[in-house]
Image: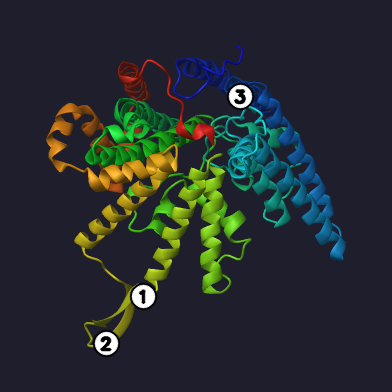
Amino acid sequence: MTYDPRQPLLFNTGLFMLLFVGFIAIYRLMRGWRTGRMVFTILFSLYFYYKSSGICCAILAGVALSDYILGLCLGRASGLTGTRRTVVMKLIVFVNVCVNVGMLFYFKYFGLIIDTINRFFTTHIDIINVILPAGISFFTFRSISYIVDIYRGQITPCRNFLDYLFFLTFFPPLLAGPVVRAKDMLPQIAGNHEITRDMVSEGVFLIITGLVKKMVIADFISGNFVDRVFDNPALYSGFENFMASIGFTIQLYCDFSGYSDMAIGLALLLGFRFKENFNAPFKAQNPTEFWHRWHISLSTWLRDYVYIPLGGNRCSRPRAYFNQFITMVIGGFWHGASWMYVIWGAAHGALLVIHKSLVRFLPATVSETIVTDTGEVTIVTVPVRRSPLSRVFNMVLTFLLMTATFMLFRSRSMDDFYMMWHQILNDFHLSVAPQFIGGYLTIVIAMTAGYFLHIIPSQWGQRVRHTFMGAPLLLQAILLAAVIIAVIQVRSSDIVPFIYLQY
């Protein structure tokens, strides 16, 4: 029952599965008592967070109280008139942003800033070891969006503190997203969230896919190959470094989208529906499309609360490019206290700017002449149809570009990043490929499965999902049990945390 930093409570642990079974049994029994069910869920969520971050759960509760009070103040300020109304409302938003950004700075970036000062000015300032609350970036983003949305008039302040506390502490997306917004979830909390058979079936399906992605593919690739190469890139050939880079890209997708699948699935079992967080990002034809498909809740948050306030594209073209670039730099910095993340964000910002600059010179539409049966001639504008070979080329090129940037994301330092590229460019040795495939056959199979299961036609995936949802509940339960048994057989001796828990 106590917090152990070496054994946090995660979705992929047996303890969580046991606790969740007991939780949902009581949760269903309380379906006629809304307040009791909400209090019970809040207490379970706070316990879940305590088991992940210890006493830091008090910070989460404090943020909820602060948001609730500021939201009410913002609602009252909206009744003022003239300049006073604008000044008071902006001041409340400013306080909320300062509180949340200040927490992020202290817990995530204070050590990085001190270390940078020590390196740059050769000083010896002691770095204070601060415990990083799990998921702090996610719940602070939810906090900021709540207050800003009230300021913009998109939602009204939450009058019931239990409703807001439920929203901010709700455990499925608490540690690693998706970034759920108040305007999407508060109406569901206020409503009568009935749990239908389809929601249960879809939730179980998503939990199964999440477990397979995380523990069968991501953890297996990571522990048996990727981590070894990234820890010592100089010991491996350029071909092995290249394969490890591809492996990490697949690992990161399976790990993070696996968490999102499980979070969305667990929420469905409790009667809440979240928006999709990943939409086959490796099918993207260009960097812009990639960010429309990857970590959708974060990319849309950055668009709405950073890019648009900076001016978006409602300005000169150079300024719009700068806005996009700096938004991605901020997104990179959000990921963690390392300049490697900032460089990673800058690389993505540069790719987006380059793509938008080039696309101006490529026609998006063409004119076609249509002759009807009556002989009438009509000219219509249609999107450019690209050949299948062109689409495959664009998809592979985009994937390789993303892989190159994710090398920055994973490398511990620029020295390691340079070493990997040195090995790839100067010591590639394609001749080791047969030996690599023979020695790492299961890794190759896992990587291939992780990639090709992802890029199969979406209709196939939907067909599998609907087939599962239409199966009897007993069969669904048997399949879930079979997956859990399979996961136990292939998992490593230690529970591997989700990558995005550190963000």
Q: Can residue 463 be seen by looking at this rendering?
A: no
Q: Can residue 169 be seen by looking at this rendering?
A: yes
Quarter placement of the C terminus? top right
Question: Which tag, 1 or 2, sits closer to the chain's start?
Answer: 1
**Nearer-the-camera pick, 402 or 380:** 402
Residue at the far top: name it: 1
The picture places residue 284, in percent across and down from the top left corner, at 34, 54
Q: Residue at x 28, y 32 (%)?
A: 235
For label 1, the residue is 361
For label 2, the residue is 377
Quarter placement of the N terminus? top right
The picture places residue 319, in percent across and down from the top left corner, at 56, 69
**Nearer-the-camera pick, 202 or 247:** 247
Question: Which tag, 3 or 2, sits closer to the chain's start?
Answer: 3
For label 3, the residue is 53
Label 3 is placed on what type of residue?
A: Ser
